Every structure is written in structure tokens, then in C-alpha cells.
Amino acid sequence: MIKVTFMGAGSTIFAKNVLGDIMCTPVLQEVEIALYDIDSGRLNESLTMLNNINQNVNGGKAIITPYLGVEQRRAALKNADYVVNAIQVGGYDPCTITDFEVANRFGLRQTIADTLGIGGIFRALRTIPVLFSFARDMEEVCPDAWLLNYTNPMASLTGAMLRYTGVKTVGLCHSVQVCAETLLKSVDMPSDDVQFHIAGINHMAWLLDIRRHGQDLYPEIKRRAAALHGKHDDMVRHEIMKTFGYYVTESSEHNAEYMPYWIKRNYPELIERFNIPLDEYPRRCVEQIAQWEQQKQALTHDSHLSHTRTHEYASYIIEAMETDRPYKIGGNVLNSGVITNLPNEACVEVPCLVDGQGVTPCHVGNLPEQLAALNRTNINTQLLTIEAAVSQKREAIYHAALLDPHTSAELSIDDIRKLCDALIEAHGDWLPAYH
């Protein structure tokens, strides 16, 4: 019987998808599941929900045990074969609110702030120390386990784990699976029987090739995209494709803050023109909290609750490793020469083969130079953020922010330093001491 430990089990909907998927997979149904969280209420909600799915999907074959708080963390991890990470350090309130409100005081506007930008930097600085504490426990109580990381900022967190711990880690994101389908839907083209090739970095990986039955679809996609009239929700990505030649994996609201071209105080008309939703993530958080209050009664008290396997990678990865039947994913791994014109120490998102040997990245070679250049602007900040978390030097935080494309396009050196100092003070004990 394999053991899967879910860190951040209070993420009830996500726990339903990942762990429900595992219980829906015939070869994985006899599984020991350890649910770990620091919030007893959310932990118990997930436990009740998953117990119902366990009974209804696979006749109660899974053994599900809750573990609450730091004092039970090692027990949750002990002898785990797979560890799924879905934590959010500091949550929406107070830390996401802080990331947005302090930046707003300096005139720096954001959309999502969980991957890059000043919000992504500070989310990483809050989270990397916690992941390192997980790693120390894992190295002692489950040294052979795979960590499947779903938490953002993906590249900074996964890169830190791969470079500074002994834990086997792969980062997983939803954007690769839905990229081609999203693009084709936006230009009213069918998505069946489509083959595609994607590589780059998380949230800024590139749809390098898209074909149906050997025919290149890009010319028709671009023709239709150019003919679109009126506003839609994907205008930034379409403009990136028009300008740089390729479609990018993550949404327009995300990519609007990864480059210096879109959110600009001196050009407010760009916000309207490209339909950019400022302060989008706080708005979503408020909506999701309200929706959960409406949903949780049904999810946690429905004794007939069932589940159908989703497209999330986790269950397919575990199945491939346990059965040695190969499965292809888009995974976040250390570059180490996979993409030859990006830094070796960068965390890249590339096709990977998963089987009984683990996760093997596929060689990509050079990206088109303009795409590699765009990736490097983000990698600079990711690497410097990791450096800051490891060294605990305040100067390294400044460097990460000063090299961030959006932040540096909007603020002076002095104001960026002041913004970082203000965020360090506002986050208080959510951050370690920086010198």
C-alpha cells in the first residue's frame, strides 16, 4: 500500500480533485492518505468529504488519517511515497492583502501577484522557509518520497527545493494542459486530434508548435486572431503572439504583470484597451471565500458524494511511477541543459517522461531567441528571490525587485527599496529576519 501525504489539506476543492483522482484510479485505490493542515476546521471538512468519496468511489479501500499542526507534521510525512504540496503561507488575509495594499501605496498596480512582481517575490519569501522545513522532515522520515508541488510561485519554490534540498521534486501547473484548447476556442477552431509542443518557464512557457494531422495550425490561428473585433478576456496573450510570434501558456491577467508593456501609470488607456483586470486576485479570493461558504455544506455532508477523475497530473504521475507505464507531463524541473539558451540553474517547464524511474525531462534545445529573452527577464527575478530566501540578505530582496520587469518599469531605485522595506515591515513574523 502506497502512502500519499497532502500538505495543505484545507484546500478542500483541490484535495477533492487530487485525492479523489487517486481513489478513482484502480491500481491506486488501496492507498494510505495523510491529510495535513494547520487549520482544524478546514482539515475536518476535507476529511469528511474525502471519507464520503472513499466509500462511494472505491468501497472504502483507502485509509484516510488527519494530522493537525506542526507537532504532527513528521507523523503525517513518515514513510510517505508521495507528498502533494498545496499550502498558501499567510493566506489571503493578511498576506495577499498586504502584497496588494502596500504596493498600491507606491503606485504599483498588480493583477494576480502570485508568480512574479513584488507580490510573487514576497509570496516566495514567505513560503520557501516553510518548504525547507518540510524538506528537513522529509529527508529524515521519507527520504525517497517525491514532492509534487502545486504551490505558487512555482518556479521559485520548485527551483529552491531542487537546488537546496535533497527532496525529489517536480512542479505541476494547470496551464500546460489547457493552453492549446484555450487558444483554439478563442479563434473558433476545433481542438480535437491536436498535437502540440510547449516549453519555457512556468506561466511563461511557449506553444512552440501546434498541428492537426501534421498540418501547422498557427497560420490560420493568427489570421483568425487578427480578424477578431471587440474586447475579450485573452487580449494580452493575443498581442504577445502577434508581437513575438508564439502563444504563451498562462492567462492574460497573469502575463500582463510579467512584462513591462501593459500596466503603466503613464498610459492608463492600455488597461482599457487590453481589458486588464487590476487587483483581480483579491477580488477572486473574496468571491471564492463566499462561494465556499455556500458549497461546503453540500460537499462535506453529502453521503452520496462521488468523483470523476480530472485532468490534474498528480494521479497520473503516481500511477506511472507505480506501474512503470510511461506518461507524458509538462513538468517544472531544474534546467540542467534541457533548454540550451536558458540558465542551467533556472527552473523550466518542459515535456517530461514519467515512469518507474521517476521524472525525466525531455531535451528541448534552443527556444526562439526572443522567447528565451522574455523568459530570462523573469528568471533573473526568480533566481534572485531564491538567493534572498537562502541568504536572508535584504540586499538580495532589493535586487530581485529591481530586476523585476513590471516593478522596474514603474518605480525608481529608491522607491523600489522603500517598497521592499515597507513590505518586510508589514509582513512582520510571516518572514524570517533579513539583515
Image: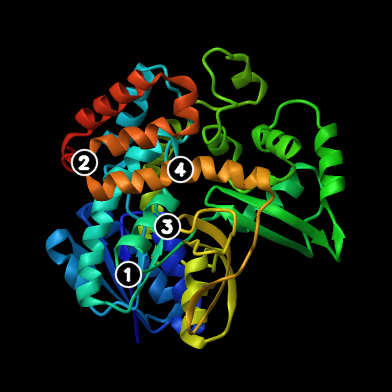
How far is the residue under mark 2 from the one under mark 4? 22 Å
- Residue 310 seen: yes
The foreground one among 228 and 414 is 414
Callout 2, which amino acid? Leu
How far is the residue under mark 1 from the one under mark 2? 23 Å
Farthest residue, direction top:
266
The residue mark sitting in front, 3 or 4, is 4
Q: Are marks 4 and 1 in contact (CB under 8 Å)?
A: no
Callout 4, which amino acid? Asn
Secondary structure category for the residue under label 4: helix
- Between discs 1 and 2, the one toward the N terminus: 1
Callout 3, which amino acid? Tyr
Which residue, given by chain and number where applicable, does mark 2 sit on? 431
How far is the residue under mark 3 from the one under mark 4? 22 Å
The foreground one among 254 and 383 is 383
How far is the residue under mark 4 from the one under mark 1? 24 Å
Side of 310 where 132 appears, left or right = left
- Between discs 4 and 1, the one toward the N terminus: 1
How far is the residue under mark 2 from the one under mark 3? 21 Å
Q: Which mark is residue 150?
A: 3
Which residue, given by chain and number where applicable, does mark 4 sit on? 380
